[in-house]
Image: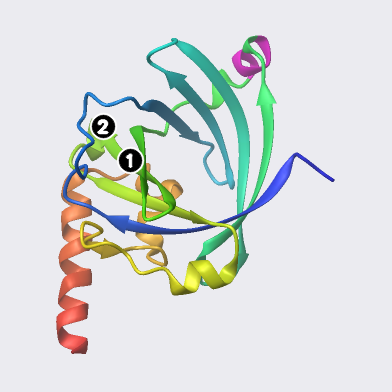
Amino acid sequence: MDKTNKIEMHRSFLIETLPEPLTRASAHIQIFDNYIANTRIRLRSVRNPQTRNWTRILQQRIPAAEKNAAVFMIFEIYLNESEYERFNLFEGAEIRKNRYFHEYDGKMLAFDLFIGELWGLNMTRVDFENADDLRTFEPPKFLVFEVTNEPFFLGENLVLKNFNDVRAEVAKLETGLSSAK
């Protein structure tokens, strides 16, 4: 089995804030994603604030099917500190977020609270083991709006945006939903 790649199935949702019992002070990890321009590659650094340990990963994310952002092929290489330093020249276009985890109805949910230029953007990601679970998942009420197949909300597209851009995009999506009814 090739352990450098995997299939990832997930759905993404906007949220207003962390659901109870989570707070910003709850245990979390910090994620720094540096997107290498004009590629499908990102340099990911993950920091555990409690242990102060870092994990460095070179990732390539490829959609498994056109116009379906729910399924990606992920290729990863874990880097040591000196290897990571060789990639520093690619740093620049970065997204920062704090990721919290909470189990809900037997599913582990990942809550991303963006910081920096995207402060105010809060998203949840639900991972699935199979396509049936992905399709039949009933989102809880605190998952406000699904954005799984909205290209705007992919990291490589968000990296050059700010929260005002996010608000404008959400307004367009809401307008499109209300006119479709």
Query: Which residue is at 21% across, 88% downward?
Result: 180
Q: Quadrant of the C terminus?
A: bottom left
In the displayed structure image, the side of residue 117 where residue 111 appears, left or right: right
Stretch in magenta: 82-86
Type of the residue with mark 1: Asp
Residue 77 at x, y = what percent? 70, 31
| Nearer to the camera, 72 or 129 | 129
- Image position of 71 with respect to 35: above or below: below
Residue 140 at x, y = what percent? 27, 62
**Residue 126, label in figure:** none
Element at badge 2?
strand
**Residue 112, label in figure:** 1
* Residue at mark 1 to residue at mark 2: CA–CA distance: 9 Å
The residue at which mark 2 appears reads as: 115
Do we see residue 172 in this rendering? yes
Query: Which residue is at 21% across, 56% downward?
Result: 142
Residue 41 at x, y = what percent? 59, 41
The quadrant in which residue 138 appears is bottom left
- Image position of 25 with respect to 142: above or below: above
Asked if the residue at tag 2 contacts the one at tag 1, i.e. Cβ–Cβ closer than 8 Å, the answer is no
Colour mapping used in the image: rainbow
- Image position of 171 with respect to 18: above or below: below
